[in-house]
Amino acid sequence: MTAIDLRSDTVTQPTEEMRRAMAAAEVGDDVFGEDPSINELQERSAALLGKEAGLLTSSGTMSNLIATLAWGSHGDEIIMGDQAHMFWNEGAGQAALAGVQTRLVPNDEQGRINADDVAAAIRPPGNLHFPRTSMVCLENTHNRCSGGALTPADTKAVCDTAHAAGVPVHLDGARIFNAAVALEVPAAELTRDVDDLSFCLSKSLSCPVGSVLVGSQDFIAQAKRWRKMLGGGMRQAGVLAAAGLVALDTMVDRLAEDHQNARRLAQGLANIDGLSVDPERIQTNIVFFEVDENLGTAAQLIAALERHGVKVSYPGKQSIRMVTHRHITPADIEEALSRTSAAVREVRAG
Ligand code: TLP
């Protein structure tokens, strides 16, 4: 039985075209700014997202950390949603390595944060008791909010509020192209109001490694110093950038297929007694669903799914995540659904 791997879009393999481009990539020492493939990727990424400059980093986690380091200093406070990847899944790097405190405001179901909550959370200057608010963070698409996409208006509302208080906005846009495809707007419209953002090459875009951080020339100059300090100056990493360039040309439009598959998956899951999910909420490639307590726990169902050859992730006590990606076909979705039904029956039978 071949496993159906729905753990994450990070499991995607580079395409043949990427492998060829990687083998043929022109490279140089990027710490000297001399890698032509990296320079091209950084310039194209910045142009595509309406920013002045870009910086290739090793991961989304590194980009998010660099943004925190570049915008603030030890003892500052950063604001983000209570479901943010930066809060849940980055090993407390913001606290441990950037020395900042994280202030949480509620995320709604779609991953939005409310501008009034942000306004209330920004620290007024001039009070010695308070930390300085150095950054507000958004996430688009929103991982833990089932891949919800923020619209340009959602983004602008928070940015206007933060900017009125002189606070920059960082966007964790790991899957920004999923948002652009789902909302049918150019990615630059989703990023216009933020001060910087990072997107991942290594997730739904199928590249083996890397993220790109984009922002103003000044911001990227600072980011480049932090990247070096973190050990992220990667020399002839143009082999990675070459895959990124192919991804920008060939991997964006096809994301619509992943979104259709995710919607179909959610519809099928909603029809399985003991599981609940609202398929109408699925905008992109991430499906979270709940396991009814009467049936059992997520951990029990995950163990049964594993026996039936379906790999999933994120066990909350009652919740499970499935992610669609380039290697998952519509037929795989139907197969995953029938295996999930069998796994549910097994859990029910005890
Ligand atoms: N997300 C991974 C895991 O870390 C959970 C996944 O499988 O979805 N921002 C967002 C919104 C992300 O989803 C991720 C990775 C990152 C940042 C970090 O990217 P990497 O893994 O490149 O450090």
Image: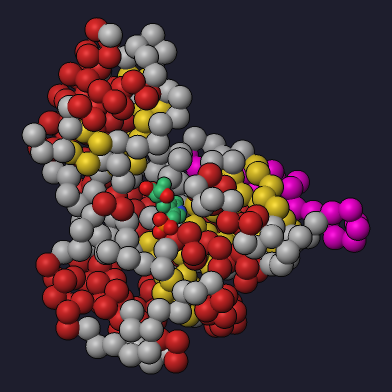
Q: How many marks?
A: 0
| Image point (70%, 53%), residue name | 101
| Image point (43%, 45%), residue name | 143
Predominant secondary structure in magenta?
loop
Residue 225: quadrant of the picture? bottom right
Relative image position of residue 292 (x, y in whole percent)? 39, 15
| Image point (40%, 31%), residue name | 315
Viewer-proximal residue among 320 and 266? 320
Q: Quadrant of the N terminus?
A: top left
**Does residue 113 show up magenta in the picture?**
yes
Q: Which residues are magenta?
A: 110-130
In this rendering, does residue 271 appear at all?
no
Relative image position of residue 14 (x, y in whole percent)? 20, 63
| Image point (25%, 72%), residue name | 243
> In the visual, does 261 lie left or right of 124?
left
Q: Is residue 168 above or below residue 325?
A: below
In this rendering, does residue 238 appear at all?
yes
**Does residue 229 show up magenta in the picture?**
no
Relative image position of residue 310 (x, y in whole percent)? 21, 33
Relative image position of residue 47 (x, y in whole percent)? 40, 77
Q: Is residue 47 above or below residue 147?
A: below
